[in-house]
Image: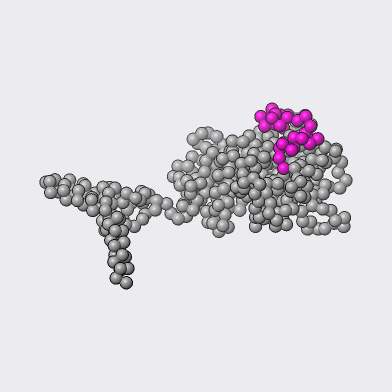
Amino acid sequence: MGNTTTKRNDVCSSSVDGVYKQKEDHFKQINAHFSAGSSGRSFASVSSHQSTYSFARPWSRVSRRRWKESTLTLPYESSKTAWPVSQLESRFLPEFPVASSENEKRFDILEEINKGAFGKVYKANDSKSGGTFALKVLSKSKVIKENSVQQVKDEVQIQRICGHHPFIVHCPLNWQSRKTLFIVSEFVEGGELFTFLKRYLALPIELVRLYVAQIALALDFLHNAGIVYRDLKPENVLLDSFGNVQLIDFGLSKWLPYGTTTKTICGTFRYMAPEILATEPYGHAVDWWSLGILACLMLTNEYPSPPVDSEPSPEERKPGSLPPNVDLDVPSRDLLLRLLQIDPKKRLRSVRTLETIAFYKGYSFLDVKEKRIQPHDLVLKYYPDGPPVVATQGDVFENFDVQI
């Protein structure tokens, strides 16, 4: 028992000595300075708040609030750690840096363009650069309540890293204030592919070929970077002024090394792969299933049979079956059947494979990537007088959002 007590006292003594070593050295300097005959004014200057902090608290960072007098003068208070940001702010670091209100003042909000689970998206002008951007404003309390802190951090990190791709929206800036997260993305003026399909219904094969190629290049890039997108749908595909594809909204994306799997059930019901709803481990192939659904919608203006049919039909159609009574040529049908393959191991799931099928025979993906083929030109070619009809039916474009 005696040895234990002695050892504990030694540890405590060395600990205290370590904590106050620099403070004691500071007082020695003060006494030496005072003994040398310095004036009272000089002594007060040496023991000012700034010098006391610099000698006694070198291990802590500068708080945005001024230190209290007791913290600076009382020895037992000076050992306390002072954090430069609140706990609420630290939860979103380092992906969301703490910025001054100057960032908010530089953006002039023009209108609300979208609304999500955690906040709203606005069209805003940047007074600094003069450009127009999409400003996403998220509530921290809602993000934390839904246990989605890491999800939001992954979203902004993925978008900033992958935004240099020609078919992915760039995110030049993001920050946080006390209660809010801000994500700035390039504003895409052409609107959603969803709206475009409602106006033009089934698209000509040449235009479908271009759009599927652009989206496939973006997905292939994400997958090779170790990212699964998981929310491909017409609402998340924007069109720029020339009609080119821009993928947005990486809220459900996840870092997933190629060849590995995950089990989270999330996405939009109509576009979810069967392995997701079957609660089986799945990988990047789920995005290619979603591309098959989107390709079917563009070619036929109808959905294939869903993975789980809420209203079972008498013919017992398997998931991914093409709409009945649709007239498709052989290459188009082959494309859809390869993408809507139930077994993910047999499913078409790479640009390299896509280039080899009949639908893309003699097609240059390099021309697509470098935007030598413009969708706007194809639209003018096939629709010189504008959209053939304005769609009014709501069944085809009904949304089923599910995230667990």
Q: Position of 10 compared to 360: left or right? A: left
Q: Residue at x 52, y 41 (%)?
A: 173
> Residue 179 appears at what percent x and percent y?
49, 53
Position of the N terminus by quadrant: bottom left
Q: Position of 381 compared to 68: left or right? A: right
Determine whether 378 is above or below 397 in the image. Answer: above
Determine whether 17 is above or below 94 in the image. Answer: below
Tell me, yes or no, whether the highlighted magenta stretch contains residue 351. yes
- Between 313 and 37, the one lying in front of the other is 37
> Residue 338 appears at what percent x and percent y?
78, 43
* Residues drawn in magenta: 349-377
Q: Residue at x 54, y 49 (%)?
A: 153
| Furthest residue toward top | 372
Position of the C terminus by quadrant: bottom right
- Between 374 and 369, the one lying in front of the other is 369
Q: Residue at x 78, y 47 (%)?
A: 341
